[in-house]
């Protein structure tokens, strides 16, 4: 049996969903720094996506698509393959439905609605399923695939009960593990990166400063992880160094949660 294909980062075509803003922007920049070609998926942030492509016009493509829409996701993958002449080899499922990390405004157990829960399930779990299924044919053709799902440390340390967001991310972890089992024989790895509060993204802009201070004081590194620090870790799961790692959840939060 021949050795499995293991593409170095500079030979990969990476899709980052929700890639125009926040953590997504740093994920795009991290992969570009290592020479990868990157598809920047966005939903409504067209100007930010176009601005990001200016960093490396020959290595980037901005494509609008709602990841909950199967047809739009399939069209996204087709555009990427046509533009770069190769299939998407690496998917980073980062897209997040509208959500604000403001603990003072969270919906408690007595009032949270199924509509709120379902909004997060649709965007996080359905979105990741759609991109994974759209990627499979190209990954099998390439003999190589990397799927990296973005999670949270809140389902291990639910200090703030964001019930809807946390439940959806926990479901995504389960999907990560079952997909890893199902797709491993095709040389497709599926892993999760779980962060805590990041300083600062659009979603955490509403977080009170006192919360940042508290998390920093409780973290071994005595600081809050930045989006750039978190994004760098995604490079490991995509790289040949992680060729035998699948079905795993790596917590990147400065040591606050010991996984």
Image (cartoon, rainbow, N blue to C red):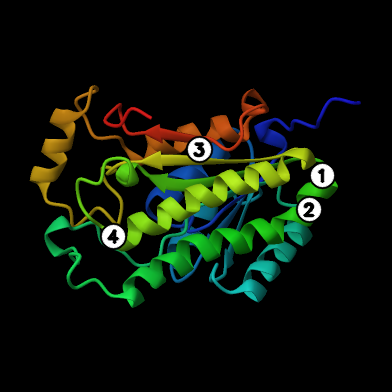
Query: Disc number at residue 179?
Result: none
Q: Is residue 180 left or right of residue 170?
A: right
| Residue picked out by circle 4 | 163
| Residue picked out by circle 1 | 142
SS at mark 2? helix
Quadrant location of the C terminus?
A: top left
Foreground label between 3 and 2:
2
> What x and y, as percent, mark residue 59?
64, 47
SS at mark 1? helix
Q: Residue, x 78% and y 61% (percent of image)?
A: 82
Earlier residue among tags 1 and 4: 1
| Residue picked out by circle 2 | 138
Distance CA(mark 1)–CA(mark 4): 39 Å
Contact check, label 1 and label 2, Cβ < 8 Å: yes
Contact check, label 1 and label 4, Cβ < 8 Å: no
Dot 4, crowdedness within 10 Å: few (<14), some or many (≥20)? many
Q: Is residue 131 above or below residue 112?
A: above
Q: Is residue 210 left or right of residue 165?
A: left
Earlier residue among tags 3 and 1: 3
Contact check, label 3 and label 4, Cβ < 8 Å: no
Earlier residue among tags 4 and 2: 2
Q: Nearer the viewer, residue 112 or 198?
A: 112
Q: Residue, x 34% and y 41% (percent of image)?
A: 153
Distance CA(mark 3)–CA(mark 2): 23 Å
| Residue picked out by circle 3 | 30
> What x and y, as percent, mark residue 132?
65, 56
């Amino acid at each position: 049996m021949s050795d499995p294909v293991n593409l170095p980062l500079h030979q990969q075509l990476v899709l980052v969903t929700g890639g125009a803003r926040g953590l997504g922007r740093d994920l795009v920049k991290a992969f570009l720094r290592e020479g990868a070609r990157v598809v920047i998926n966005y939903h409504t942030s067209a100007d930010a996506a176009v601005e990001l492509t200016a960093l490396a016009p020959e290595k980037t493509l901005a494509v609008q698509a709602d990841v909950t829409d199967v047809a739009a996701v399939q069209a996204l993958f087709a555009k990427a393959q046509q533009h770069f002449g190769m299939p998407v080899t690496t998917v980073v499922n980062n897209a997040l439905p509208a959500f604000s990390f403001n603990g003072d405004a969270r919906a408690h157990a007595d009032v949270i609605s199924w509509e709120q829960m379902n909004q997060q399930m649709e965007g996080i779990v359905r979105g990741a399923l759609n991109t994974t299924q759209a990627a499979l044919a190209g990954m099998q053709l390439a003999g190589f695939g990397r799927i990296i799902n973005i999670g949270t440390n809140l389902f291990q340390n639910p200090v703030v009960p964001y019930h809807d967001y946390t439940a959806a991310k926990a479901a995504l972890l389960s999907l990560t593990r079952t997909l890893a089992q199902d797709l491993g024989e095709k040389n497709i790895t599926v892993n999760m990166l779980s962060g805590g509060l990041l300083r600062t993204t659009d979603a955490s802009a509403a977080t009170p400063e006192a919360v940042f201070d508290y998390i920093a004081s409780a973290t071994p590194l005595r600081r809050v992880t930045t989006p750039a620090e978190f994004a760098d870790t995604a490079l490991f799961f995509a790289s040949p160094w992680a060729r035998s790692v699948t079905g795993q959840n790596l917590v990147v939060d400065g040591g606050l949660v010991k996984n």
